[in-house]
Image (cartoon, helix red, strand yellow):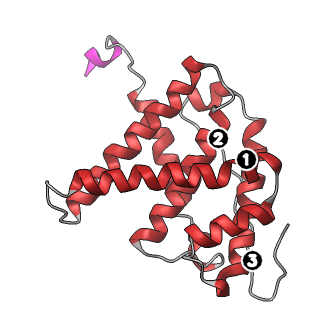
Amino acid sequence: MILRFFRRNDGGETIQRLYGAIVARSRDPVFYTDYKVPDTVEGRFEMILVHAFLLFHRLKEESEERRQLGQRVFDAFCVDMDANLREMGVGDLTVPKKMKRVTQSFYGRVSAYEIPVDAGQSGALAEAVLRNVYGSDTERTLQAAALAAYMVKAAEALKTTGYDTFAAGDFPMPEPARISFTETAPS
Protein backbone atom coordinates (compact mmCIF):
# COMPACT_ATOMS: atom_id res chain seq x y z
CA MET A 1 0.00 0.00 0.00
CA ILE A 2 2.76 2.47 0.89
CA LEU A 3 4.59 1.69 -2.36
CA ARG A 4 1.96 3.59 -4.34
CA PHE A 5 3.55 6.82 -3.07
CA PHE A 6 6.81 5.88 -4.77
CA ARG A 7 5.33 4.91 -8.13
CA ARG A 8 5.76 7.23 -11.05
CA ASN A 9 2.43 8.81 -12.01
CA ASP A 10 1.86 7.93 -15.66
CA GLY A 11 -1.31 10.04 -15.79
CA GLY A 12 -3.55 7.00 -16.16
CA GLU A 13 -5.75 8.08 -13.27
CA THR A 14 -6.24 11.51 -14.86
CA ILE A 15 -7.16 9.93 -18.18
CA GLN A 16 -9.65 7.60 -16.51
CA ARG A 17 -11.18 10.51 -14.59
CA LEU A 18 -11.58 12.56 -17.77
CA TYR A 19 -13.03 9.67 -19.71
CA GLY A 20 -15.26 8.81 -16.75
CA ALA A 21 -16.52 12.40 -16.69
CA ILE A 22 -17.35 12.18 -20.41
CA VAL A 23 -19.31 8.99 -19.86
CA ALA A 24 -21.04 10.35 -16.75
CA ARG A 25 -22.16 13.53 -18.50
CA SER A 26 -23.33 11.52 -21.51
CA ARG A 27 -25.58 9.50 -19.19
CA ASP A 28 -27.35 12.56 -17.74
CA PRO A 29 -31.04 11.56 -17.77
CA VAL A 30 -32.05 14.96 -19.20
CA PHE A 31 -30.59 13.94 -22.56
CA TYR A 32 -32.86 10.89 -22.69
CA THR A 33 -36.00 12.44 -21.18
CA ASP A 34 -36.12 16.06 -22.38
CA TYR A 35 -33.83 15.86 -25.42
CA LYS A 36 -35.27 12.47 -26.42
CA VAL A 37 -31.92 10.97 -27.35
CA PRO A 38 -32.76 7.30 -27.95
CA ASP A 39 -31.93 5.36 -24.81
CA THR A 40 -30.22 2.64 -26.80
CA VAL A 41 -26.65 1.50 -27.27
CA GLU A 42 -26.45 3.77 -30.33
CA GLY A 43 -27.96 6.76 -28.51
CA ARG A 44 -25.60 6.42 -25.56
CA PHE A 45 -22.69 5.99 -27.96
CA GLU A 46 -23.68 9.23 -29.72
CA MET A 47 -23.75 11.10 -26.42
CA ILE A 48 -20.27 9.82 -25.55
CA LEU A 49 -19.12 11.05 -28.97
CA VAL A 50 -20.70 14.48 -28.35
CA HIS A 51 -18.91 14.93 -25.04
CA ALA A 52 -15.60 13.47 -26.24
CA PHE A 53 -15.80 15.88 -29.18
CA LEU A 54 -16.28 18.80 -26.77
CA LEU A 55 -13.15 17.89 -24.81
CA PHE A 56 -11.04 17.34 -27.92
CA HIS A 57 -12.41 20.52 -29.48
CA ARG A 58 -11.23 22.48 -26.43
CA LEU A 59 -7.80 20.84 -26.41
CA LYS A 60 -7.14 21.44 -30.12
CA GLU A 61 -5.89 24.96 -29.36
CA GLU A 62 -3.25 23.70 -26.94
CA SER A 63 0.37 22.89 -27.76
CA GLU A 64 1.20 19.54 -29.32
CA GLU A 65 2.40 18.24 -25.97
CA ARG A 66 -0.82 19.26 -24.24
CA ARG A 67 -2.99 17.84 -27.02
CA GLN A 68 -1.54 14.45 -26.09
CA LEU A 69 -3.96 14.50 -23.16
CA GLY A 70 -6.79 14.33 -25.67
CA GLN A 71 -5.09 11.53 -27.56
CA ARG A 72 -4.75 9.52 -24.36
CA VAL A 73 -8.44 10.05 -23.56
CA PHE A 74 -9.28 8.96 -27.12
CA ASP A 75 -7.18 5.83 -26.57
CA ALA A 76 -9.13 5.13 -23.35
CA PHE A 77 -12.36 5.60 -25.33
CA CYS A 78 -11.19 3.04 -27.90
CA VAL A 79 -10.21 0.54 -25.20
CA ASP A 80 -13.62 1.00 -23.57
CA MET A 81 -15.49 0.57 -26.86
CA ASP A 82 -13.48 -2.57 -27.63
CA ALA A 83 -14.30 -4.00 -24.20
CA ASN A 84 -17.99 -3.10 -24.58
CA LEU A 85 -18.19 -4.79 -27.97
CA ARG A 86 -16.66 -7.95 -26.53
CA GLU A 87 -18.99 -7.80 -23.52
CA MET A 88 -21.98 -7.57 -25.89
CA GLY A 89 -20.80 -10.81 -27.48
CA VAL A 90 -19.14 -9.51 -30.64
CA GLY A 91 -16.65 -12.14 -31.79
CA ASP A 92 -12.91 -11.59 -31.74
CA LEU A 93 -12.70 -11.60 -35.53
CA THR A 94 -15.45 -8.98 -35.88
CA VAL A 95 -14.26 -6.55 -33.19
CA PRO A 96 -11.55 -4.91 -35.37
CA LYS A 97 -14.09 -4.21 -38.13
CA LYS A 98 -16.53 -2.72 -35.63
CA MET A 99 -13.76 -0.66 -34.04
CA LYS A 100 -12.88 0.72 -37.45
CA ARG A 101 -16.51 1.87 -37.75
CA VAL A 102 -16.36 3.39 -34.26
CA THR A 103 -13.32 5.48 -35.12
CA GLN A 104 -14.80 6.45 -38.50
CA SER A 105 -17.97 7.53 -36.69
CA PHE A 106 -15.95 9.65 -34.29
CA TYR A 107 -13.97 11.39 -37.00
CA GLY A 108 -17.13 11.89 -39.04
CA ARG A 109 -18.76 13.62 -36.06
CA VAL A 110 -15.70 15.81 -35.54
CA SER A 111 -15.86 16.83 -39.19
CA ALA A 112 -19.59 17.60 -38.99
CA TYR A 113 -19.50 19.41 -35.64
CA GLU A 114 -16.22 21.36 -35.81
CA ILE A 115 -17.12 24.26 -38.11
CA PRO A 116 -20.58 25.02 -36.68
CA VAL A 117 -19.26 24.86 -33.10
CA ASP A 118 -16.31 27.12 -33.98
CA ALA A 119 -18.72 29.61 -35.54
CA GLY A 120 -21.27 29.32 -32.73
CA GLN A 121 -23.89 28.32 -35.32
CA SER A 122 -26.25 26.04 -33.46
CA GLY A 123 -28.63 26.01 -36.47
CA ALA A 124 -26.07 24.41 -38.77
CA LEU A 125 -24.96 22.14 -35.94
CA ALA A 126 -28.57 21.06 -35.34
CA GLU A 127 -28.69 19.56 -38.84
CA ALA A 128 -25.66 17.39 -38.10
CA VAL A 129 -27.04 16.45 -34.68
CA LEU A 130 -30.41 15.54 -36.20
CA ARG A 131 -28.66 13.29 -38.70
CA ASN A 132 -26.18 11.67 -36.31
CA VAL A 133 -27.97 11.47 -32.97
CA TYR A 134 -31.57 11.17 -34.13
CA GLY A 135 -31.13 9.29 -37.41
CA SER A 136 -32.69 12.21 -39.39
CA ASP A 137 -36.03 11.78 -37.56
CA THR A 138 -37.67 15.12 -38.38
CA GLU A 139 -39.95 14.72 -35.38
CA ARG A 140 -36.84 15.36 -33.26
CA THR A 141 -35.93 18.72 -34.85
CA LEU A 142 -36.70 20.61 -31.62
CA GLN A 143 -34.56 18.27 -29.56
CA ALA A 144 -31.72 18.39 -32.11
CA ALA A 145 -31.77 22.19 -31.93
CA ALA A 146 -31.68 22.07 -28.12
CA LEU A 147 -28.79 19.59 -28.11
CA ALA A 148 -26.89 21.74 -30.63
CA ALA A 149 -27.45 24.83 -28.44
CA TYR A 150 -26.13 22.85 -25.45
CA MET A 151 -23.02 21.85 -27.43
CA VAL A 152 -22.30 25.44 -28.48
CA LYS A 153 -22.81 26.66 -24.89
CA ALA A 154 -20.56 23.90 -23.54
CA ALA A 155 -17.83 24.66 -26.09
CA GLU A 156 -17.95 28.35 -25.11
CA ALA A 157 -17.73 27.47 -21.40
CA LEU A 158 -14.81 25.12 -22.00
CA LYS A 159 -12.86 27.87 -23.79
CA THR A 160 -12.54 29.68 -20.48
CA THR A 161 -11.39 26.57 -18.64
CA GLY A 162 -7.64 26.43 -18.12
CA TYR A 163 -5.65 23.45 -19.30
CA ASP A 164 -4.59 22.63 -15.74
CA THR A 165 -8.20 21.78 -14.93
CA PHE A 166 -8.19 19.05 -17.58
CA ALA A 167 -4.69 17.92 -16.60
CA ALA A 168 -6.06 17.39 -13.08
CA GLY A 169 -8.73 15.09 -14.51
CA ASP A 170 -11.64 17.51 -14.28
CA PHE A 171 -14.11 18.13 -17.10
CA PRO A 172 -16.47 20.91 -15.97
CA MET A 173 -19.54 20.92 -18.18
CA PRO A 174 -22.63 23.12 -17.98
CA GLU A 175 -25.86 21.42 -17.02
CA PRO A 176 -28.08 20.70 -20.02
CA ALA A 177 -31.13 22.98 -20.05
CA ARG A 178 -34.46 21.33 -19.38
CA ILE A 179 -36.77 21.56 -22.38
CA SER A 180 -40.36 20.63 -23.06
CA PHE A 181 -42.27 19.92 -26.24
CA THR A 182 -44.09 23.24 -26.09
CA GLU A 183 -40.94 25.38 -26.07
CA THR A 184 -39.41 26.79 -29.20
CA ALA A 185 -35.96 25.59 -30.09
CA PRO A 186 -33.12 27.52 -28.41
CA SER A 187 -30.74 29.32 -30.69
Classify mark 3: helix, strand or loop: loop
| In the depicted structure, whether residue 86 falls above or below residue 163 | below
C-alpha distance separating marks 1 and 3:
20 Å
Classify mark 2: helix, strand or loop: helix
Q: Amino acid at mark 3?
A: Ile
* Residue 14 location (% of width, % of height): 47, 31
Residue at image location 28% in from the left, 17% down from the top: 2
Q: Nearer the viewer, residue 28 or 89?
A: 89
Classify mark 1: helix, strand or loop: helix
Find out whether residue 2 is within the magenta segment: yes
Residue 73's tag is none
Q: Nearer the viewer, residue 123 or 86?
A: 123
Q: Quadrant of the C terminus?
A: bottom right
Residue at image location 30% in from the left, 19% down from the top: 4
Residue at image location 39% in from the left, 37% down from the top: 75
C-alpha distance separating marks 2 and 3:
25 Å
Quadrant location of residue 112? Answer: bottom right
* Residue 31 location (% of width, % of height): 60, 70
Q: Residue furthest left?
A: 92
Near mark 3 (Cα within 10 A), the count class, few <14, some 14-19 or many ≥20, is some
- Residue under label 2, please give it: 57
**Label 1 vs label 2, nearer the camera:** 2
Q: Amino acid at mark 2?
A: His
In the image, the segment drawn in magenta is 1-5
Residue at image location 58% in from the left, 22% down from the top: 66
Residue 155's tag is 1
- Residue under label 3, please give it: 179
Sequence order check, earlier mark of 1 and 2: 2
Quadrant location of residue 164? Answer: top right
